[in-house]
């Protein structure tokens, strides 16, 4: 057998790649690009038109009115005689909405009268008077009864006794984007609550020259719940100075906390050696 190689023959290199494969890859790239553009358009339209579905999509400025209305509902549910104080809003920054985005949380609080032994009864009564869609209920917590409710828009409500004759009801947005920030409602002209704070300061021998801080919340019926707040510096202060204003009928006398009613106003005093803090409140009708 001869080992000579025949000339004039090209070695075989296998079949050439078919042209249709290249065309398929081209069309796949086109379809992928069109789908990406379509998906981006749909996302943009959803962000523009659809309501947010999670808390992290609603900013503090969007949640602010919900929080204020919730405070008004709590004031009404507490009753004019049981409402002690509306606290101003607190915005705490530094939380994380996502691993890449900072956020803040908004809180407001309402103080309610609850003499020792009545805490669960008071909380249950408040829960029953709140809107049905809040799904408010009272359960047992580690330190006593706890009210929990949902004010809507991912705004949570909790109520806990503090052990000094009061219950604090807290309205909390949780961590969310700041947006344009929380803007409180403009303070209206003071009424009998301002006069009551002035009278209490004078009864304690303190200056009543400085205007008190005014805190409001919208009542469900359109009126305003109002609290006038004032703080005096260190010095002796005793509830005996307020006894005459209370007419001997204190709502709460659990030092350093003292509360009484004068006309339509409930006055709350916290009297410590470091400061005398006063709050006078007019609640919601009904």
Image: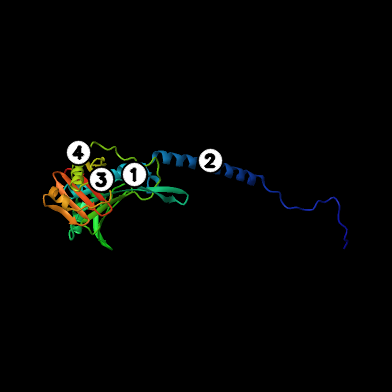
- The mark found on residue 34 in the picture is 2
- Residue carrying label 1: 63
Residue tagged 3:
230
For marks 1 and 3, the one nearer the N-term is 1
Q: Nearer the viewer, residue 63 or 49?
A: 63
| Residue 183 image offset from top left, x and y in percent | 34, 40
Answer with mark 2 or mark 4, whichever residue precedes in sequence.
Answer: 2
- How far apart, in angstroms, are the residues tagged by discs 1 and 2? 37 Å
Q: Are marks 4 and 3 in contact (CB under 8 Å)?
A: no
Q: Residue at x 17, y 58 (%)?
A: 118
Which numbered dot is residue 191? 4
Tell which residue pokes out farthest to the top in this image: 189
Mark 4 falls on what kind of element?
Answer: loop
The answer to which of marks 4 and 3 sits earlier in the sequence is 4
Comparing 52 with 225, the one in front is 225
Q: Locate residue 148 relative to residue 244 in the image: left or right.
A: right
Q: Looking at the picture, how far across and down is residue 170, in whole percent?
A: 28, 51
SS for callout 1: helix
Q: Sequence-wise, which precedes: disc 1 or disc 4? A: 1
For the residues labelled 2 and 3, the Cα–Cα distance comes to: 64 Å
């Amino acid at each position: 057998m001869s080992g000579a190689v025949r000339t004039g023959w090209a070695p075989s290199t296998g079949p050439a790649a078919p042209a249709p494969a290249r065309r398929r890859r081209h069309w796949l790239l086109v379809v992928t690009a069109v789908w990406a553009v379509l998906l981006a358009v749909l996302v943009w339209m959803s962000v523009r038109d659809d309501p947010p579905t999670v808390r992290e999509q609603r900013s503090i400025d969007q949640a602010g009115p919900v929080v204020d209305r919730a405070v008004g509902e709590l004031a009404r549910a507490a009753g004019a005689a049981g409402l002690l104080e509306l606290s101003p809003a607190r915005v705490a920054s530094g939380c994380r909405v996502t691993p890449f985005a900072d956020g803040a949380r908004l809180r407001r609080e309402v103080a309610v009268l609850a003499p020792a032994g009545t805490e669960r009864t008071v909380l249950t009564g408040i829960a029953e008077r709140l809107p049905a869609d809040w799904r408010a209920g009272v359960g047992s917590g580690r330190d006593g009864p706890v009210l929990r409710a949902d004010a809507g828009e991912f705004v949570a409500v909790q109520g806990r006794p503090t052990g000094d004759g009061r219950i604090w009801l807290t309205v909390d947005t949780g961590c969310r984007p700041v947006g344009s920030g929380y803007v409180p409602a403009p303070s209206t002209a003071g009424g009998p609550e301002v006069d009551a704070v002035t009278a209490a300061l004078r009864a304690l021998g303190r200056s009543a020259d400085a205007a008190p801080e005014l805190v409001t919340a919208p009542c469900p019926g359109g009126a305003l719940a109002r609290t006038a707040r004032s703080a005096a510096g260190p010095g002796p202060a005793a509830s005996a100075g307020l006894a005459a204003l209370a007419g001997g009928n204190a709502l709460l006398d659990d030092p350093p906390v003292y509360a009484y009613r004068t006309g339509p106003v409930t006055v709350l005093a916290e009297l410590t050696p470091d400061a005398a803090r006063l709050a006078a409140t007019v609640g919601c009708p009904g």
